[in-house]
Amino acid sequence: MGFSSVLYDVVDHCHTEAPEVASWSDDGLHFIIKDPNAFSTKKGIEFSSFHRQLNIYEFTNISKTLKKKGITVTAGHKHFEHKHGKFIKGRKDMCESINPKPKKESELEAY
């Protein structure tokens, strides 16, 4: 199972069992990590590594996008909202088509 399928299962589980930690958005088009520390502890992952994986798989950080537009997401809370066009609630089948972005030529030459 790839990163996006595992992430789907984690978000789906949290949405049902621990919505204070992470959940789907109301429209199911993005997910929200409401408590990064609890998310890391419950899932046994380092949040910075997880965040790096999101970038590798080209998830968009909605929180940053909204902040740049001057929209406050939530006052006083440090949470993260991400989306990907193929990462949708109820459509786990689409996760298999989410691939990491291709490495740049300069990264390949380093090997």
Image (cartoon, rainbow, N blue to C red):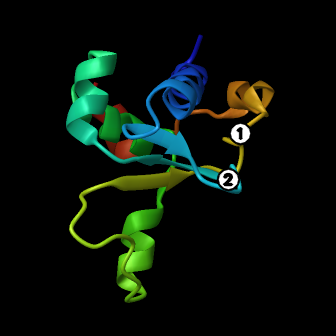
The answer to whether residue 21 is above or below residue 31 is: above
Residue 110 appears at what percent x and percent y?
25, 32
Q: Residue at x 45, y 55 (%)?
A: 81
Q: Quadrant of the N terminus?
A: top right
Label 1 vs label 2: CA separation? Answer: 7 Å
The 10 Å Cα crowd at callout 2, few under 14, some 14 to 19, many 20 or more, is: some
Going by the numbered disc 2, the residue's amino acid type is Leu
Q: Residue at x 37, y 82 (%)?
A: 68
Q: For the residues labelled 1 and 2, say whether their Cβ atoms are less than 8 Å apart.
A: yes
Mark identifier at residue 29: 2
Residue 73 appears at what percent x and percent y?
39, 72
**Sequence-earlier tag: 1 or 2:** 2
The answer to whether residue 4 is above or below residue 76 is: above
Going by the numbered disc 1, the residue's amino acid type is Lys
Residue 53 appears at what percent x and percent y?
39, 34
Tag 2's secondary structure? Answer: loop
Q: Which residue is disc 1 drawn over?
A: 89
Q: Residue at x 50, y 24 (%)?
A: 17
The answer to whether residue 48 is above or below residue 83 is: above
